[in-house]
Image (tube, grey):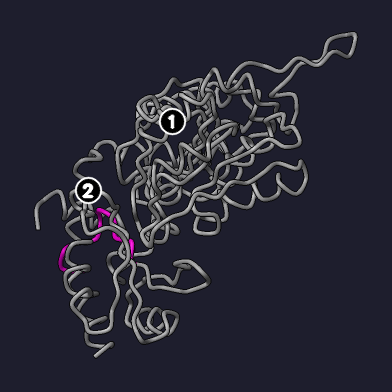
Amino acid sequence: MSDIDDQIKRDFAVTRKIIYMNNGAIAPTPLSTIKAVTDFMLKCAESGPDAPQTSEYVTSLLDELRTRVAHLINCDRDEVVLVQSTTEGLNIAANGVDWKHGDAIVVRGGRHEHYANYLPWVSLSHRKGVQLRELAIDESGYFDLGDLEKLIKGARLITMSHALYNTGAIMPLEEVGRIAQQNNALFCVDAAQSAGTIPIDVKKMGCDFMAFPGFKWLCGPTGIGAFYCSKKASELLSPQTIGSESATLSEHNVISYLGMPARFQAGFRNYPGAAGLEASLRYVLRIGLESVRKKNMKAAGILRDVIGKIPDVRLYGPDDENKRTSIVTFTATTDSSILVKKLEQNNIIFASRDIGGGKKAVRAAPHFFNSEEEAETAASYVKNFLR
């Protein structure tokens, strides 16, 4: 183990007790993030939470956080809206557009999408009479670009995940963005399973909206995330909440929304979470996404190599590692929930997730703090149990 790997192990207290590979759900936070949150609370306690000095610090903190998010996804700082989750960000996009009866939305895979990026659009179809056009997929979750070009005709928006929560497959978003632009359609991306584990460039993707949480691959605290809204697309969205932080009222009772990103942040107060996410982003970006991905894929490679050779086990996701994240999903003759429970009893944390059609699979989601030795141990336990 290198000095860097050894330091990472010390930074993540979870590694002292268990093999935690459920980072696609919620990742643990490094000690520096925990310290950043407690330092923020201590500063408020000592200086006064609404003292001028504290207010200046909060303004500086939020500006720094937006700078780091902008660096992560290659956008401008004022295109970064702070939200509590991916779900909130996607709902801002879904509910902010002035939909007309008969408008169409293209959704990849229907129920194969995470519900955070499916239910808002289903709800729109019920409330606004918007037509959902579901893009057919293969067993890994991929679709035919030719089919997309047919379905997008006359549609106002395409929405899909960047990387899939159930198979780890990475979608060809640059090609999708090109098709969206050619058809004058908006493009919305759920980046919950990509932000912090693979590179993101919203300009290359050509997307208008993107949402992701801080508490998955970015190793930040819960209750905070980011919603990217391009300057051009922001003019098409109406804020769904309003308050003194997002709008002004003239003496004649005329409401005027503030500019980006304040217009979409009525009532935002999760400053401790912002301090934690800024620290986590600094941590991940210091390691570098290329190094993070390299470490992740080494652990994933071990899991796939060992588990994939077990009789009656079926691996999901593409074989080409360039087309997937470190998520390793598989089914066996044993019920997935039983295997996940047995793993937990042996201090190994995987998860059970829907693989499509109500069928459950076992999902491992290793991150950069998971060593190759941990991957070997976890894979060996799965192999021995299923034998």
The image quadrant that residue 127 belongs to is top right
Place of residue 58 in the rendered image (x, y in percent of width and height, measured from the top left): 53, 27
**Furthest residue in direction left, as rendered:** 2
How far apart marks 2 and 1 lie (CA) works out to 22 Å
* The residue stretch that appears in magenta: 364-374
The structure residue drawn at horizontal position 57% and vertical position 56%, both measured from the top left corner, is 115
Q: Is residue 105 above or below residue 64?
A: below
In the rendered structure, which amino acid carries the disc numbered 2? Asn
Is residue 53 part of the magenta span, yes or no? Answer: no
Left or right relative to 281: residue 381? left
Left or right relative to 161: residue 14? left
Classify mark 2: residues with Cα within 10 Å, few (<14), some (14-19) or many (20+): few
SS class of the residue under badge 2? helix
Place of residue 149 in the rendered image (x, y in percent of width and height, measured from the top left): 46, 36
Instruction: Please count the marks in the image.
Output: 2
Determine the main secondary structure of the stretch shown in magenta: loop
In the rendered structure, which amino acid carries the disc numbered 1? Ile
Say which quadrant the N terminus sits in: bottom left
Earlier-in-chain disc, 2 versus 1: 1
Pointer 1 residue? 179
Pointer 2 residue? 322
The image quadrant that residue 260 belongs to is top right
Place of residue 83 in the rendered image (x, y in percent of width and height, measured from the top left): 57, 38
Classify mark 1: residues with Cα within 10 Å, few (<14), some (14-19) or many (20+): many
